[in-house]
Amino acid sequence: MKTIELIVPCYNEETCVALFYNRIKEVFAQIPDARFVITYVDDGSRDRTMEEIKKVLAAAEQGTVQYISLSRNFGKESAIYAGLSRSTGDYVAVLDADLQHPPELLIEMLDALEKEGYDCASARRVSRKGEPVFRSLLSKTFYHVINHITVIDLVPGSTDYRLMKRSVVDAIVSMSEKERFTKGIYAWVGFKNKWIEYENVERVAGKTKWNILGLFKYAVSGFFAFATTPLRGVVYLGMVIVLLAFLFAIYVFIGASRTSSARTGYASIMILMLFLGGVIITILGMIGEYMARIYMEVKNRPIYFAREMYMMSDIVHSAEEKQGEICAEQDVKKE
């Protein structure tokens, strides 16, 4: 029987942990030829999320719930990587604990992988009902801009919700970069993917952890993670400034030749200084962003640290090692 492992990053999701498990049980009751394993990844939660995960583990069927508790809040991207890097399932899915990613889509995703020959299946929101208009506008702008300045092609409305074969998971885990942008990594590794559309779903409980500032930082991280266009754009900007300076010099020369009145040029000089100063600072800031990311990569720090974990693969491995030691001792006694 194939195993579908669900990677569920959690940050202050104490009200959603048990609800998520119960919903997953209902879904997999419709898939009799598959067993599920939920890997909760507690991303340094400050509420009782970890306690709720342990309660679910104690009440759940043997081998259906495991967890990784990170030593602090490393961010959702690191939590996803932690779950994927420790996963062992035949198929692996990433979805949110708040049930905004409908678990029922797993049935259609599984059919896409097994019956239609896809390597992965991803969920895509086709509506943003219930979301602020300004936030929806920013999202559309983000997809429009990133698809024009990067080498990746992000589908508008795409989410982190995806079911993947083992080969796809291995490809994603092999990209061990520190500044992670999961949507971009999904697009960059390629593979044959099927998009499954769904309507926007409200959180089942709790409050969203994403505000406008957080989303903006996430978008900026995505730009710098996959775009070299800004650096090339600096070259073109320099050429444009040189051309404008040349045209302005011609303008000043013509104006000076037509009149004999004194020209101080104070305003022109101030405008040029402010303009060039702003351009230089912007360019330095942009280069600094890239250098900061290079600096973080060169230090080669781990993407996450686990404070505590309960993984079935570790338990099985320990049992096998213990059994091997027992057999070795018996062989020695026989000799």
Image (spheres, rainbow, N blue to C red):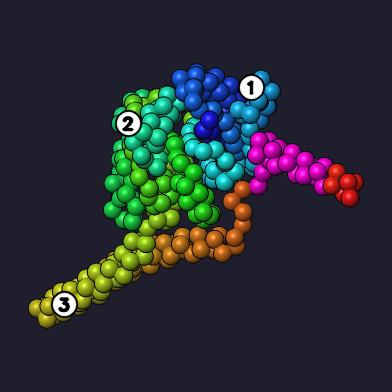
Could you tell whether 244 is left or right of 103 in the image?
left
Residue 69 appears in the picture as rendered: no
Residue where numbered disc 1 is placed: 60
For residue 219, above or below residue 278: above
Q: CA distance from mark 1 to mark 3?
A: 80 Å
Could you tell me what secondary structure mostly forms the magenta stretch? Answer: helix
Give residue 317's position: percent from left, percent from top: 70, 42
Marks 1 and 2: in contact by CB < 8 Å? no
- The range drawn in magenta is 305-328
Q: Are marks 2 and 3 in contact (CB under 8 Å)?
A: no
Location of mark 3 (residue): 250
Of mark 2 and mark 1, the one earlier in the sequence is 1
Q: Is 324 or 183 nearer to us in this picture?
A: 324
Amino acid, disc 1: Ala
First in residue order: circle 2 vs circle 3: 2
The spot of residue 150 in percent (x, y) is: 34, 55
